[in-house]
């Protein structure tokens, strides 16, 4: 059973409710049918029901038993507006503007998650990451003790002697361009949770740099050193070490000479990159030159499961992202 199959199997056990705000988007409608048919989740599509059913007919999707909600016709619309006004009152949000926002399916879907009507939210097939994250951050917010959202990939490599039989979690590869030391520590913690929730492995976290245990001096290295120290203090049960060069993090022989006293070096299966440039380049190098299969990205750090799709996503990508969403820990 490969990693995606394992994630789908866990999703079936969890039986979560997931809202898909882009209910009139053809790939989303096709994915909804597959998700429901495979028993991965109970799906809710948002939008005008007539339009959704016309889209379903045009793409040959059977969605007869799937819940469809048109926000402007929903019985909860007024109460959702009231709640949004309450949540955003310090920002001066007026009811008229709140009503306008709540007609947007992304806001309505985020409120469904906040109110516990569903357990997760997946969008982005026709919206930018910014548009997806804005209502999620305003309504659902980040998890307690976490201030930053990050994006992780699970990398399934053919080289079984490294990581967890070839499987790694890479972060942040998708969201935060230049995290502070404190944010890097939070990304490490969230990435460890992703390793447990989605991969089912005990995380061993390496904080990556171009230096190993003081071999180089630079302000960029110092950020990783501070981040490692903060993570060790804040999350004492987390197996984490740094700063480590990539080879020292994953190759036992190199680790024995560069970081002989480290319990993580040479054994790392969660790799935290110092910034988004390194993370994004790193996962694509491993994918293209190392022939690894990336699974994700999955968003980390939200109070409740929210995931963003690429606008170029396939139907299969949507199905898999919903399955991952079903496996993320609920607050």
Image (tube, grey):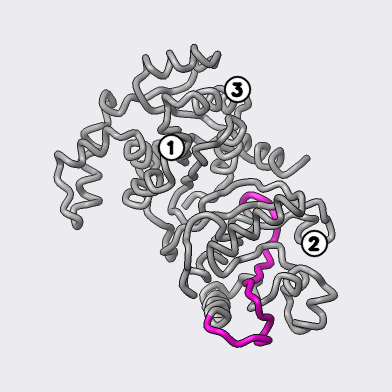
- Tell me the SS state at disc 2: loop
Which mark's residue is nearer the viewer, 2 or 3?
2
User: Quarter-wise, where is residue 213 in the image?
Assistant: bottom right
Residue at the image position 80 percent from the left and 61 percent from the top: 162
Task: Give the residue pinned by disc 1.
Answer: 118
User: Quarter-wise, where is residue 325 in the image?
Assistant: top right
Disc 3 crowd, CA 10 A, few/some/many (<14, 14-19, 20+): some
The residue closer to the viewer here, 277 or 93, is 277
**What whole-number distance in Å separates the C-alpha atoms at marks 1 and 3?**
18 Å
Rendered view: 191 above or below 64: below
**What whole-number distance in Å separates the C-alpha atoms at marks 1 and 2?**
38 Å
Task: Give the residue pinned by disc 2.
Answer: 162
Sooner in the amino-acid sequence: mark 1 or mark 3 = 3
Q: Is residue 223 left or right of residue 293?
A: left
Q: Is residue 111 left or right of residue 297?
A: left
Rendered view: 221 above or below 145: below
Q: Position of residue 150 (x, y in %)?
A: 50, 58
Which residues, given as a range, are shown in magenta?
197-219
Task: Give the residue pinned by disc 3.
Answer: 37
């Amino acid at each position: 059973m490969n990693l995606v199959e394992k994630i789908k199997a866990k999703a079936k056990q969890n039986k979560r409710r997931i809202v898909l705000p882009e209910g009139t988007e053809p790939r989303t409608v096709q994915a909804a049918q597959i998700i429901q048919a495979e028993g991965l989740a109970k799906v809710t599509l948002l939008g005008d029901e007539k339009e959704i059913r016309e889209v379903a007919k045009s793409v040959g999707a059977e969605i007869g038993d799937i819940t469809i909600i048109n926000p402007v016709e929903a019985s909860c619309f007024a109460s959702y507006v009231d709640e949004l006004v309450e949540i955003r009152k310090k920002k001066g949000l007026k009811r008229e503007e709140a009503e306008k926002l709540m007609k947007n399916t992304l806001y309505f879907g985020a409120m469904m998650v906040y109110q516990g009507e569903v357990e997760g939210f997946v969008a982005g097939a026709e919206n930018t990451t910014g548009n997806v994250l804005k209502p999620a951050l305003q309504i659902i917010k980040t998890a307690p003790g976490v201030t930053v959202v990050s994006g992780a990939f699970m990398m399934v490599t053919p080289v079984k002697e490294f990581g967890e039989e070839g499987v790694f979690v890479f972060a942040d590869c998708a969201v935060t361009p230049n995290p502070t030391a404190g944010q890097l520590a939070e990304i490490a913690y969230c990435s460890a949770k992703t390793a447990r929730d989605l991969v089912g492995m005990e995380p061993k976290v390496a904080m990556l740099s171009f230096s190993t245990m003081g071999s180089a001096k630079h302000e960029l290295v110092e950020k990783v050193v501070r981040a490692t120290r903060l993570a060790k203090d804040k999350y004492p049960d987390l197996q984490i070490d740094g700063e480590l060069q990539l080879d020292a993090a994953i190759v036992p022989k190199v680790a024995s000479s560069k970081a002989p006293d480290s319990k993580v070096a040479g054994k790392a299966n969660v790799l935290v990159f110092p910034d988004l440039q390194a993370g994004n380049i790193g996962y694509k190098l491993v994918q293209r030159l190392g022939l690894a299969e990336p699974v994700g990205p999955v968003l980390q750090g939200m109070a409740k499961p929210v995931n963003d799709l690429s606008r170029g996503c396939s139907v299969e990508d949507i199905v898999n992202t919903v399955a991952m969403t079903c496996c993320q820990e609920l607050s």
